[in-house]
């Protein structure tokens, strides 16, 4: 009975059984044939052996390629076989040699590919290969008769490779981008190229070809796609270059320096052209009407040129097949033409960074219902722009609208519409959304497929929108930067998220971070919580973010020690910012396992010493902490660890400065002592700041060999001796600060050779002699914007987040604001206008001062200083200068502060100085000036009596002494008689002061006569007076320093 049922069931299901039998038979056949050919298996092992000899990889090379007959080579990594014949048809050997130095090149033995006679696809990219080994390369390649796709990009091939590749008979796709090919092709090279008669796709981007390459490529009869981006074609294109390329469907000429008008007239017969990329060139003028002839065009990019004017309305509106239009980064103006509604296939529209104007509500946007991508950022649109215009855009995936235009109001709230789209990307930065309420857009409640959200800089308020993360499970990037969100920062706790980028900086968030934050967002690559009010310890779970590349916690109230898990486990970190918090303890423990671009720990309470073993870091800032110990050698040895910039200022480091090669070094305000080592190599240095230490001795001549250094600050030390004449070697110097030392001698004229100096401070030293007249040769502020060094002092750049949208133009767009520049914030503090200010960036570039105060300079003020027309401040006070104030000072039209006090200047104050309209500080007190002070008009109406005191022969407002007063006549005899009748103890004051004055003059002349006659006594007298003066000065200065030090510690 059971058997009958089974047979009946089998008969009913026989078709299924039959199908399974056929499937089994097919599997057996495939299994029989998929085994790779033995000769090819041995060829792969021989190829591996050769590659291994050419690399110094620390990781195993192709570990699955083993000499074991039981190992099926068709299942080896980077190998693909034909599923029927078992022959190797594809080898993917890119980046085999990526661990070698960039300069290392090697040669590939092409004969090793002979066993693979069925090979169709070969990828050898990114290997630094310079050529082929052997003399029969062409013969070897000709045997690869089926090779159709070859990728040799990112190597070091030159044009000789074309001779060899001409032997490949059926090559269809060739990628030679990012190699070392340059110049035009010679006639024999063109012949080799023309042999590739089957070639349809050619990529020669990022080489150094000139425009003649276009003529040579016209010999390829079936070429359909050509990429020549980032070469040196330059110059305008003409019909001579492009005449034979009219079969192209794809032409990419991006980034070639092309100029003139876009070459649409010479491309009128390009009837098959579908994709044209002319971006990042220098085309000028408007779009020629000949663009209408490109009737098959589907995508065109004119991004980042210098085009202007209005759009070619009729011709552009005729491109009805157009799907992608990128006009960004030009100077187009006017309204968007209404006829653009004819572009019914338009999927991508980017008109950002132009000067388009008008009201967007009246534009064709509402008619482009096929749109998937729209970018309207940075134009001159005005009026109200309502998101209800997108009500029928069901295909919309990307909206970008960054704005710096306060005339455009963006409204997202409208009860009459519900979005029909599900966005992937929403970028609405600096748009003043929903004024004045500042509410977060409500349509976002209905969005569930978002991958990127940036609503930064919008003054939005309320609590942290946790629902954005809950509703959008595929969210990759969330930026809420620079809003007014307040309260706790809590993430969803019930699951881990795929979030890679999170920025909530510059808000009003507070409280402690969740203990399990690292487990909630373990895939995070970028986290920015800076400029909030977070407090408490950092959770140890932050170490679970093993992919973290950038972490910024600066300007908060975090405290405690930095978790060991952060510095031990987050090994991908490139940028770590913990500055301006209350962290303490030792961060450089044995667990510190980070290799960083930038480490910023400044303005905390870290203690301990720097490690003896070098840190793997390029930019190190631990200023304003309590670090101590000696400076390790690796700090000044960037030759081996590539340490570019170091700021250890305001700590308690002691000992000597070690020898080495530096780039930027700030050791100000420590306890360093000893000599400045002559072996300190400043050859490639940019900034050296050693202010406020106990360094002594003279300046070694060897350090003045640098054509790059722009800042040299050694103030407030105990350096002595003369300024070496070799200082002229610092030809790029902009800031020279030597004040507060014990330098002596004359000011060397070699300083006049440093023509780019803007700030020079030689005050509080013992310089003598005269002021060099040649100072007028120094720029002191006469620099153009292209010569600024402090505002452009970027340390590095880290690429940002790529837009998750693929287009026909295949542009890898970075989301604005996600790329990361980190700077070297060189800050200089110095005294001007009686105030100590901190200068940095553009202000520091534009600042210009000359301070020679508190020295022993003599002689007259050189009138040539009046040629320093761009200088902002001049301080020559507390010297022994004499002579008149130069009238040429009236030419210092930018002058804001002039201090000539405490000298021996005489004569009148030039009335022409009243023309200095920017003058805020003017003092000439305690000199021997005479005559009438300048009229109280313009800026001089703001200067009081204190500016002139100590000059008994000056008169006029604001002084109490009037210039019209006359001396009273001598007293009469009658008055004298009446005076004699008075009491015996009453004294005639006039006679008393007259006799006293005469006596003093006689005594003074007597002393002067004796000293004049006896030079030995004269010298001893002067030395005694001078020694007492400086003893008093330094006693007061040292006492104040000790008191200040005790108060700080």
Image (spheres, rainbow, N blue to C red):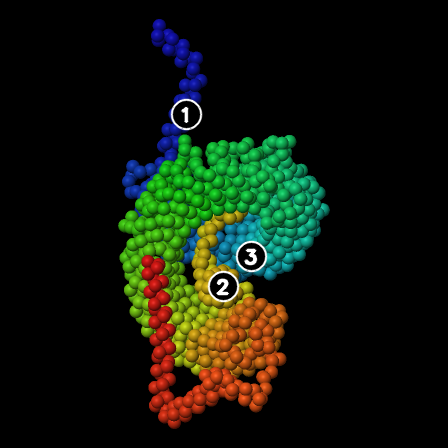
Residue at 52%, 78% (x, y): give it.
951
> Disc 1 or 3, which lies upstream in sequence?
1
Dot 1 corresponds to which residue? 23
Give left or right: position of 229 versus 583.
right
Dot 3 corresponds to which residue? 256
Whether the residues at callouts 1 and 3 have beta carbons within 8 Å, the answer is no
> Disc 3 or 2, which lies upstream in sequence?
3
Element at label 2: helix
Residue 225: x and y in percent read 55, 48
Camera-side residue: 758 or 105? 758
> Disc 2 or 1, which lies upstream in sequence?
1
Give left or right: position of 810 versus 704.
right
Vertical placement of residue 36 versus 933, above or below: above
Residue at 50%, 57% (x, y): give it.
207
Quadrant holding the N terminus: top left
Give left or right: position of 619 versus 967.
left
Dot 2 corresponds to which residue? 844
Camera-side residue: 125 or 221? 125
Element at label 1: helix
Labelled disc at residue 966: none
């Amino acid at each position: 009975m059971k058997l009958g049922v089974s047979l009946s069931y089998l008969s009913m299901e026989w078709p299924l059984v039959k199908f399974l039998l056929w499937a089994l038979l097919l599997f057996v056949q495939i299994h029989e044939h998929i085994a790779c050919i033995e000769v090819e298996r041995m060829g792969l092992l021989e190829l591996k052996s050769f590659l291994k000899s050419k690399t110094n990889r620390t990781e195993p090379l192709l570990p699955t390629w083993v000499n074991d007959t039981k190992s099926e080579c068709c299942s080896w990594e980077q190998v693909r076989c034909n599923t029927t014949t078992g022959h190797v048809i594809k080898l993917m050997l890119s980046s085999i040699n990526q661990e070698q130095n960039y300069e290392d090149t090697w040669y590939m033995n092409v004969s090793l590919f002979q066993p693979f006679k069925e090979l169709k696809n070969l990828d050898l990219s990114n290997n630094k290969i310079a050529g082929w080994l052997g003399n029969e390369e062409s013969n070897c390649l000709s045997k690869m008769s089926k090779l159709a796709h070859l990728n040799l990009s990112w190597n070091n091939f030159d044009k000789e490779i074309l001779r060899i590749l001409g032997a490949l008979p059926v090559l269809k796709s060739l990628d030679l981008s990012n190699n070392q090919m340059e110049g035009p092709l010679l006639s024999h090279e063109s012949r080799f190229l023309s042999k590739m008669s089957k070639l349809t796709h050619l990529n020669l981007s990022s080489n150094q070809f000139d425009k003649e390459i276009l003529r040579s490529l016209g010999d390829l009869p079936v070429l359909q796609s050509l990429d020549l981006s980032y070469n040196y074609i330059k110059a305008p294109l003409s019909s001579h270059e492009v005449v034979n390329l009219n079969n192209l469907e794809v032409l990419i000429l991006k980034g070639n320096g092309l100029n003139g008008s876009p070459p649409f007239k010479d491309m009128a017969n390009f009837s098959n052209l579908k994709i044209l990329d002319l971006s990042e060139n220098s085309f000028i003028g408007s779009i020629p009407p000949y663009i209408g002839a490109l009737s098959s065009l589907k995508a065109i990019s004119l991004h980042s040129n210098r085009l202007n004017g209005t759009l070619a309305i009729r011709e552009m509106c005729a491109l009805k097949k157009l799907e992608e239009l990128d006009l960004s980064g030009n100077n187009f103006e006017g309204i968007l033409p209404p006829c653009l509604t004819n572009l019914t296939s338009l999927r991508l529209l980017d008109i950002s960074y132009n000067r388009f104007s008008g009201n967007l509500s009246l534009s064709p946007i509402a008619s482009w219902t096929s749109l998937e991508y729209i970018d309207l950022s940075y134009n001159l649109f005005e009026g109200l722009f309502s998101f209800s215009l997108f009500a029928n855009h069901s295909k919309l995936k990307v909206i970008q609208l960054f704005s710096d235009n306060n005339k455009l109001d963006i409204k997202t709230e409208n009860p009459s519409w519900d979005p029909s789209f599900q966005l992937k990307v929403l970028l609405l930065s600096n748009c003043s959304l929903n004024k004045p309420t500042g509410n977060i857009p409500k349509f976002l409640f209905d969005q569930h497929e978002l991958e990127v959200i940036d609503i930064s800089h919008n003054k939005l308020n309320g609590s942290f929108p946790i629902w954005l993360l809950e509703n959008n499970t595929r969210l990759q990037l969330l930026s809420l930067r620079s809003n007014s969100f307040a309260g706790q920062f809590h993430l969803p706790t019930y699951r881990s998220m795929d979030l890679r980028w999170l920025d909530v900086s510059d808000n009003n968030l507070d409280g402690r971070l969740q203990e399990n934050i690292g487990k909630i967002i373990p895939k995070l690559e970028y986290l920015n919580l800076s400029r909030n009010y977070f407090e408490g310890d950092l959770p140890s779970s932050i170490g679970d973010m093993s992919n973290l590349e950038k972490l910024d916690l600066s300007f908060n109230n975090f405290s405690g020690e930095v978790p060991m898990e952060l510095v031990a486990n987050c090994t991908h970190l490139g940028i770590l910012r913990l500055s301006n918090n209350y962290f303490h303890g030792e961060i450089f423990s044995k667990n510190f396992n980070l290799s960083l671009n930038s480490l910023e720990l400044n303005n905390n309470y870290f203690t301990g010493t720097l490690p003896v073993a070098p840190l793997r870091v390029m930019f190190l800032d631990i200023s304003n902490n309590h670090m101590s110990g000696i400076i390790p050698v690796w700090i000044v040895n960037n030759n081996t660890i590539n340490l570019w910039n170091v700021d250890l200022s305001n700590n308690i480091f002691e000992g000597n400065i070690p020898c080495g090669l530096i780039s930027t070094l700030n050791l100000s305000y420590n306890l360093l002592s000893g000599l400045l080592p002559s072996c300190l190599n400043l050859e490639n240095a940019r900034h050296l700041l050693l202010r406020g230490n106990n360094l002594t001795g003279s300046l070694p001549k060897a350090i003045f060999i640098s054509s790059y250094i722009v800042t040299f600050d050694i103030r407030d030390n105990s350096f002595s001796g003369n300024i070496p004449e070799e200082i002229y070697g610092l030809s790029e110097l902009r800031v020279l600060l030597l004040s507060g030392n014990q330098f002596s001698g004359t000011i060397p004229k070699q300083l006049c050779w440093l023509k780019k100096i803007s700030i020079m401070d030689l005050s509080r030293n013992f310089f003598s002699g005269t002021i060099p007249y040649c100072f007028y040769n120094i720029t002191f502020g006469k620099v153009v914007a292209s010569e600024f060094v402090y505002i452009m002092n970027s340390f590095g750049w880290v690429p940002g987040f790529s837009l998750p949208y693929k287009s026909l133009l295949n542009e890898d767009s970075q989301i604005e604001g996600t790329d990361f520049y980190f700077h070297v914030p060189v800050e200089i503090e110095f005294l001007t206008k009686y105030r100590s200010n901190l200068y940095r960036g553009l202000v520091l570039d534009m600042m210009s001062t000359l301070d020679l105060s508190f020295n022993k300079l003599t002689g007259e003020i050189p009138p040539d200083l009046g040629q320093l027309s761009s200088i902002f401040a001049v301080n020559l006070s507390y010297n022994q200068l004499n002579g008149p104030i130069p009238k040429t000072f009236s030419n210092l039209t930018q002058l804001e502060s002039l201090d000539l006090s405490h000298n021996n200047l005489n004569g009148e104050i030039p009335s022409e100085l009243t023309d200095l309209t920017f003058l805020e500080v003017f003092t000439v007190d305690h000199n021997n000036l005479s005559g009438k002070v300048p009229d109280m008009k313009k800026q001089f109406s703001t200067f009081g009596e204190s500016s002139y005191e100590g000059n008994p022969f000056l008169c006029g407002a604001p002084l109490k002494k009037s210039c019209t007063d006359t001396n009273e006549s001598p007293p009469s005899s009658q008055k004298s008689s009446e005076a004699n009748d008075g009491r015996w103890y009453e004294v005639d004051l006039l006679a008393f002061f007259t006799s006293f004055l005469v006596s003093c003059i006689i005594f003074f002349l007597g002393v002067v006569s004796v000293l004049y006659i006896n030079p030995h006594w004269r010298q001893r007298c002067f030395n005694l007076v001078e020694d007492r003066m400086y003893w008093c000065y330094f006693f007061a200065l040292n006492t104040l320093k000790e008191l200040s030090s005790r108060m700080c510690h």
